[in-house]
Structures are given as structure tokens and as C-alpha cells.
Amino acid sequence: MTTAMPNKTHNAIDISKYIICVAQSNGDTITNLKLQKLLYYAQAWFLVNNDNTKLFDDDIVAWQYGPVVVSVYEKFKSFGRTPIDIACDLEQDFSDLCDNVKEYLDEFCETFLSYSATELVAITHQEEPWQEAIAKGYGTVINTDTMYRFYTKMLDNE
């Protein structure tokens, strides 16, 4: 993935809207469940590619079906299990996101949108960052330093 050092970190809702918009422009759909896992992996791989710098400041917590950003869950929970559908324009609606972040997210989406929500849940449940947090109880914040170490090690072992 491209190195995408931002001028600032962003909030997870803005990142979510961008991911949803990319998916919609590709004819893909995203449920809240899938969006949560995509946010988790977007944060994880951004950390790895940017020397442990966060893509967004919002905490990611361990819930039953994997990692969740609560503010994003609340924003889109009205969609239930159906695909999230928002009006958006990739060219005009995301001027607050720097070009490097957009490039990173475009590349990220190219790789990760092909996974189903079920696949993403299963993968997160097998990995140390979620397992470490969930062992302490539902709602425990997933440590970004743990994410950085785990996914850096995974990349180094490829």
C-alpha cells in the first residue's frame, strides 16, 4: 500500500463516507457490519504504512462480531443489515481529506472491498488485536500499538 502521511488525522465518519462512496461508485454495497471491519483494517494498514500514525482518532472497540467504531455504528445503525446508501460525489465531497489519504483509501478499497462481512468478521476473530481486547470484555478499546506490531509482523512474514 502507498505511504499516505496525512497533514492531520481524520474522524472515522469522514473515512467511512469515503469508503462507502468508493464502494457505491464501483457498484458494491457495504453494510454497517462490513464497514466496521473495513475501518479496522484501514486503520491497521495505515498504521503499518505510516510508522504507527493513525488514520483517524476514534477508538476501535471489541464487540461480539469484531472491531467497531461506535460513532460510525451509531451514524449508520438505521440501515440495520441492509446496505448503507448515501448521496456522495468522490470528486466534490471529500475536500477535507488530503490527496494522500484518498490515494491510500482507493488502494485499500481495491484490495478489501472484495471480502464479505462474514469473511472479515472471521479473520478479525483469529487475530491478536481483537482477541487481546475481547479477553478483557466487550467494549474494550483495541490498542493501536498492538495493531501496529501485529500487522507489521504479518507484513514482515509475507
Image (cartoon, grey):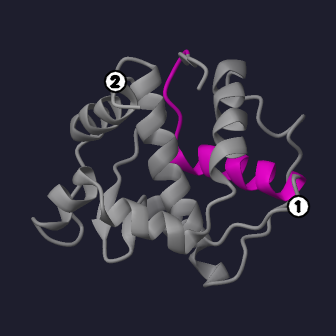
* Residue at image point 44% right, 19% down: 50
Q: Position of residue 49 (x, y in %)?
A: 46, 22
Which portion, as a residue range, is magenta? 7-25
**Residue 140: quadrant of the picture:** bottom left
Q: Position of residue 32 (x, y in %)?
A: 58, 70
Give the residue number, with chain letter if any, for mark 1: 27
Crowding at dot 2, Cα within 10 Å, few <14 / some 14-19 / many 20+, comes out as some
* Residue at image point 34% right, 31% down: 157
The secondary element bearing badge 2 is classed as loop
- Apparent side of residue 94 relative to residue 133 in the rendered image (left or right): right
Give the residue number, with chain letter if any, for mark 2: 52
46 magenta-colored: no
Q: Quadrant of the N terminus?
A: top right
**Residue 81: quadrant of the picture:** bottom right
* Residue at image point 58% right, 19% down: 4
Is the residue 25 above or below the residue 157 in the image? below
Crowding at dot 1, Cα within 10 Å, few <14 / some 14-19 / many 20+, comes out as few
